[in-house]
Amino acid sequence: MLSVDHGRTPFLPRLARVVSAHDETPDVRTLRLELLEQAAERLHWEPGQFAEYSVFGTGECVFTLANSPTRSEYVECTLRAVGKVTTGMAALVVGQVVGLRGPYGNRFPVEQWRGRDLVFVGGGIGMAALRAPLQFVLDKRADYGEIVVLNGARSVADLVYKDEMKEWQASDGVRVVRTVDPGGETAEWDGEVGLLPDVFGRLGFKPDGRVVIVCGPPIMLHYMFQALEKDGFAPDQVVTTMENKMKCGLGLCGRCNIGRFLVCRDGPVFTWAQVQTLPKDF
């Protein structure tokens, strides 16, 4: 559901200034933004929600809110420059101002995960959608069981959050597994080599109440779901997110229609059980 401040129209963007920009890969960048309004107007969101970001004079684009609300003194988004607006976002420098409206969408059910073991599986920039719930459970570490992060990409150069993975690994009860596709490794690479579904299978996870949170391109999700089914995971143990299909963010344009769902209105977070009801070619 939408999460909009009372008394504020969902069409009116806030203003936010870029305070830092970090290149994750040659074509993926993370921007940190600070709102220009008073502290009383601080943005409130939940892990998994998204926002519309405006590059003035160019257009709007949708990105997940890539940091946890436990770190709400700033807003971060991780993006790949692939079109006019995203290229404009990627070109922003410290001090420039953008528009930000939201948050929109539903959220990851982090309360239901308390006491359970968690596996976060991110493919490429799909890891950006998992970063907020991952940060959330790390910031409330005592509430959760074992945490495994499986971060994969086509090549070593395409892995996002390389520095942060070291921080995640340093937390008690957290294991980070890095993997790249065959042929994407370098001579110095000391992680796994293999497609994400195959590496997940090799890790030998037992369902045992474990929750798997996964995000990546559709083809990766297709084979991940097959691997999860083979390993005995139930559809309600698996959660994903589909924010890449959205445009207006308000359920008005219909662009993100998948079967009976509008991703921005009914998602972007869905269980595997819900995904099984969607058209096969979504």
Image (tube, rainbow, N blue to C red):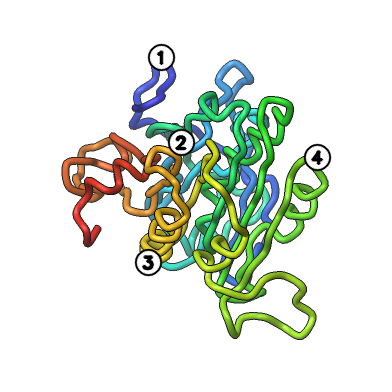
Q: Which residue is mark 1?
A: 6
Give the mark toward the camera: 2 or 4. Answer: 4
Give the mark toward the camera: 1 or 4. Answer: 4
Q: Which residue is mark 3?
A: 219
Give the mark toward the camera: 1 or 3. Answer: 3
Amino acid tagged 2: Gln
User: Whole-Å distance between the Cαs marked 2 and 3?
Assistant: 23 Å
Q: Nearer the viewer, residue 131 or 197?
A: 197
Quadrant for the N terminus in the image: top left
Tell me residue 4's x, y (percent): 40, 23
Q: Residue at x 61, y 73 (%)?
A: 180
Q: Which residue is mark 4?
A: 172
User: Whole-Å distance between the Cαs marked 3 and 4?
Assistant: 33 Å
Mark 4, secondary structure of its residue: loop
Amino acid tagged 1: His
Give the mark toward the camera: 2 or 1. Answer: 2
- Look at the image and tell me whether residue 16 can be seen: yes
Q: Nearer the viewer, residue 90 or 29?
A: 29
Amino acid tagged 3: Ile
- Is disc 1 surrounded by few (<14), some (14 to 19) or many (20+) residues within 10 Å? few
Q: Which residue is mark 2?
A: 49
Q: Quadrant of residue 160?
A: bottom right
Quadrant for the C terminus in the image: bottom left
